[in-house]
Image (tube, coloured by chain):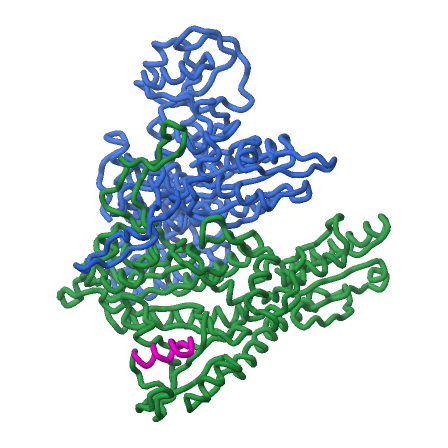
Chain colours: A green, B blue
Amino acid sequence: MAFEKVKRSDNYSEWYNNLVKDADLAEHAAVKGCMIIKPYGYAIWEKMQQQLDKMFKETGHSNAYFPLLIPKSFFEKEEKNAAGFAKECAVVTHYRLKVDENRKIIVDPEAKLEEELIIRPTSEAIIWNTYRSWIQSYRDLPILLNQWANVMRWEMRTRLFLRTSEFLWQEGHTAHATSEEALIETKQMLDIYAEFAETFLGVPVVKGVKTPNETFAGAIETYCIEGLMQDGKALQMGTSHFLGQNFAKAFDVKFQTKEGKLEYVWATSWGVSTRLMGALIMAHSDDEGLVLPPNLAPHQIVIVPIYRTDEEKENVETAAKEIKKKLEANNISVKLDNRDTHKPGFKFAEWELKGVPLRIGIGPRDIQNGTVELARRDTKEKSITSIDGIENTAKVLLNDIQTSIFNRAKVFRDNNIREVNTWEEFQKVLEEKAGFISAHWDGTDITEEKIKQLTKATIRCIPINNPQEEGKCILTGNPSKQRVLFAKAY
Amino acid sequence: MAFEKVKRSDNYSEWYNNLVKDADLAEHAAVKGCMIIKPYGYAIWEKMQQQLDKMFKETGHSNAYFPLLIPKSFFEKEEKNAAGFAKECAVVTHYRLKVDENRKIIVDPEAKLEEELIIRPTSEAIIWNTYRSWIQSYRDLPILLNQWANVMRWEMRTRLFLRTSEFLWQEGHTAHATSEEALIETKQMLDIYAEFAETFLGVPVVKGVKTPNETFAGAIETYCIEGLMQDGKALQMGTSHFLGQNFAKAFDVKFQTKEGKLEYVWATSWGVSTRLMGALIMAHSDDEGLVLPPNLAPHQIVIVPIYRTDEEKENVETAAKEIKKKLEANNISVKLDNRDTHKPGFKFAEWELKGVPLRIGIGPRDIQNGTVELARRDTKEKSITSIDGIENTAKVLLNDIQTSIFNRAKVFRDNNIREVNTWEEFQKVLEEKAGFISAHWDGTDITEEKIKQLTKATIRCIPINNPQEEGKCILTGNPSKQRVLFAKAY
């Protein structure tokens, strides 16, 4: 359990790796680049799934499931999409093993596939190939589907949750009769992601559009939400793509309009992944461990009984159970840690490491006084509070923690968006402070690429409702009509 | 939508295929052997998942996630398990594609993996390789994990839901300090599956143990639940394996006991899959379409408004919305089908095809009378009932439908377990009536295999608490101590 005491200020990256491991969230698998999501980490992911799924369904989406494997010939139909993902594709070439004469298991050379199959890096190809037979008329539209699935993008350099070869995600794939409707959908899903990030993860995000260079392979426009981590690096937390008619054309998906004309269908796709776990960890946690927002914490409260004698134990546990019951009746999730094998001090440290928002300590003297000790994980403030009415105290505190976590992250983020007007300043800010830099850019791929090569900073997005402002490109001095947001990013 | 009118009695298999397609449950994917689960089918699967997940958590299990890909060297460690699945394994050999000089996408020959990776057909290997580092002491036990995942077992002959190369399932993998504890777990999970099958799917099941021949590759004992479909064929609906120390030995997973000794860990694994969708469809549906048990129906009630004029429409829809609200306030899921594009008769047929347990028809005259027409899907009985108190009427009816569906299936099942004592009778019953046959067997693999070759009937299980009864083997005449259950099976 012991959280290896590397501080964020010492080595942020090592701090992150240790925390993911020590808080029992995930670990590297024996398969290169893949991860094992441990029960505590998975419980947080499940809470994310439940909430997102609810929001998708409230906006008219249904879940479905499409195959893991994509024939290579489908995959190459949308050229840009294929070229964009080709370098990261795991390829299935055989469908059978056999036991050889030495009783070793070998790949059966006679079971070679005629056509190789790709493990989905994303499912536009297989889904649009299917939509062709589902869509004939405007009456079949819109189609509003989502799937929860695993995908694979082969990575050489991996980091748990942030970049792994296999990851879990949801991918929405919608089909529409008009461009306008598809654009409304694209933006609606971006808004849902932003709302989820801010209200549940407690991470403030910038909504924006990607530059052509950073647009999803196969999309017309990619919308994104960008968060800022405590080390001043940005993290892309979700994307929503307006695909235009690209996939409809690649897969020949046409529909008959009300007027009887035959037109290509308009598309969107949108996704968030287990990467959000990385955002959650990096945005809030501190040198003692995780800090979980109550809206996503598997246990919102942990109760640690404190006693010496058997008699004390019985009394304290009885009282603890009553408190648990009261809290649960108010829809608060509570863990009563009555393990005999560990001392209270150990438990305090463990639940601190695991980020439980509120801790209740209760001992014999507390019972006499009708009180307990409440400790907040986020501020580490402690208070003595009455057992009577504790469910209300807890509710107020949990709400306050959720808000405080968000506000703290928002202050940090807002303090770390800097307007910069010269190339020298740009380099200096990047070096010394990181964060978002709002600066002028001449709008060309070449300049964007050059800045990336020189500084590792990328254009995170062109914020939505960006004020138009004449200026000069930070690198080339060429005219620019608006500032864009740069940052080093995960 | 039109359900192609092949009756069960004409061609059961064609009836099933049509129904899966026409009720919008699933379809074959372009990838050989794989399926696309459509939104309506997936909504039923989600209901199954939610309920099972609840039952797993109530018995102390947590969810986690392990990688999709298994290195071949791990896979071969448990020899029997490897041999059992080797012939069905999809193999990843390359991790990159590239665009060649003709702008075609090809597999990059330079991106060949040093060691091939297997797409998991089941996850014992990868999980027990992981448990080695998770388990040191008896304090680390038990481990009670489950994962919801996709798996792949290459199939040449596939049928939607019943047998597909990729399918969705849950797989529980637990680790215990003693053999007794692992056996209790194995049986507990079997009981949970049986309870789920009977209470939610409405399918009565026989609980039993598989013969050595049919035991899971790598298990000591395989427990199963077996259901009977309307065509008299059996369907294995879930299995729970007592793995002994086989995987602990293969992956060297030892723990220190309380007494300080080093011992191998005991294991179980258990799973149910999207195959349960096949059971649900085949056990209850009729020539008009699906018959869904209310406990798993995405919509428990559909309301179809009936009107001619715009004024009628407004009144009827207002009343329908009020009824919907009342029902939903009582936790009944309701679909109001107010599509303008289709006539009531069409809607009636569509929801019958889709198996919605209760249909409410409401027209202008109904409103005057303060009544609606209620139609049960299972018995097709119709009744006029008062709008006042409809939530109670509906609840009673839904409960009654759930019970009736189960009872009907149980009567059918019970009537189709036949005791048979001669080989001639055995063949005749199989030919003419199918169903389960309770008969004596001499306990040898050879006889079991011979019966299978001669009749296609297999031993489905040795029922739990099977009465001991001296007798003679149906085929060989050799002595037998108990009857076992034979059937032709999916």
Residue A457 on the magenta span: yes
For the image, the number of numbered tags is 0
Q: Residue furthest left?
A: A261
Is residue B285 visible in this depiction of the protein? no
Residue B16 on the magenta span: no
Residue A370 location, x and y as percent? 82, 63
| Along the viewing direction, whichever of A308 and A178 lies nearer the viewer | A308
| Along the viewing direction, whichever of A4 and B24 lies nearer the viewer | A4
Residue at 42% over, 54% down: A166
Residue A109 location, x and y as percent? 28, 36
**Quadrant for the C terminus of chain B in the image:** top left
Residue B309 location, x and y as percent? 25, 64
Position above or below: B379 against A205 = above
Q: Can you tell which quarter of the image residue A230 is in?
A: bottom right
Left/right placement of residue A230 relative to residue B438 reads: right
Is residue B407 visible in this depiction of the protein? yes
Q: Can you tell which quarter of the image residue B245 is in?
A: top right
* Dominant secondary structure, magenta: helix
Q: Residue furthest bottom?
A: A470
Position above or below: A213 against B367 = below
Residue at 46% over, 60% down: A158
| Along the viewing direction, whichever of A38 and B370 lies nearer the viewer | A38
Task: Point out the stretch of residues depicted in magenta.
Answer: A446-461
Residue B3 location, x and y as percent? 24, 43
Left/right placement of residue B365 relative to residue A295 reads: left
Q: Can you tell which quarter of the image residue B474 is in?
A: top left
Residue at 51% over, 67% down: A279
